[in-house]
Amino acid sequence: MSNALRVLVVEDEALICSFIEDALSDGGFEACSVHSGEAAMSTFRDGRKQCRALLTDVNLGDGISGWELARMRLYPGGVRKAVLRRRRSSRMLPELLM
């Protein structure tokens, strides 16, 4: 594994997820992707992916929302940053989790 920051991408639309992964890779990050809030929780709790940041869609369909994911402290060492993305807006809303 490289020294690049690993970002967990949570996006329920495969095409958008692919675009986000490419953009992160171009920016020097490593992306690990899942397609639901529940899968994100499992990934963080598992810890094997070693994701230290979260980029999530706000609306993930039924179940856990992106807002809920960003507020939870799931990774044993703590997620350092979360970015929430809305489909209806091109704005990205950063949230620093301490």
Image (cartoon, grey):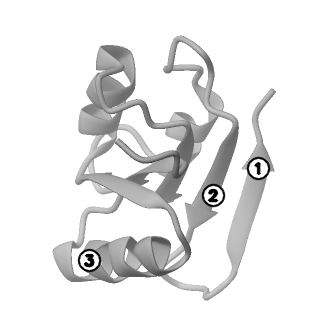
In the image, residue 79 lies at what x, y percent? 61, 31
Q: Earlier in the sequence, mark 3 or mark 2?
A: 3
Whether 18 is drawn above or below 90: the answer is above
Identified by mark 2, the residue type is Val
Q: CA distance from mark 1 to mark 2?
A: 6 Å
Crowd tier of the residue under label 1, counting other residues whose Cα lies within 10 Å: few below 14, some 14–19, many 20 or above? some
Name the one closer to the observer, 29 or 56: 29
Q: Are marks 1 and 2 in contact (CB under 8 Å)?
A: yes
Identified by mark 3, the residue type is Ser
Whether 19 is drawn above or below 62: the answer is below
Name the residue located 72 percent from the left edge and 65 percent from the top edge. Answer: 93
In the image, residue 62 lies at what x, y percent? 27, 47
Identified by mark 1, the residue type is Glu
Name the residue located 64 percent from the left edge and 32 percent from the top edge. Answer: 71
The residue carrying mark 3 is 18
The residue carrying mark 2 is 83
Q: SS of the residue at dot 3?
A: helix
Name the one closer to the observer, 98 or 29: 29
Q: SS of the residue at dot 2?
A: strand
- Residue 38 occupies quadrant: top left
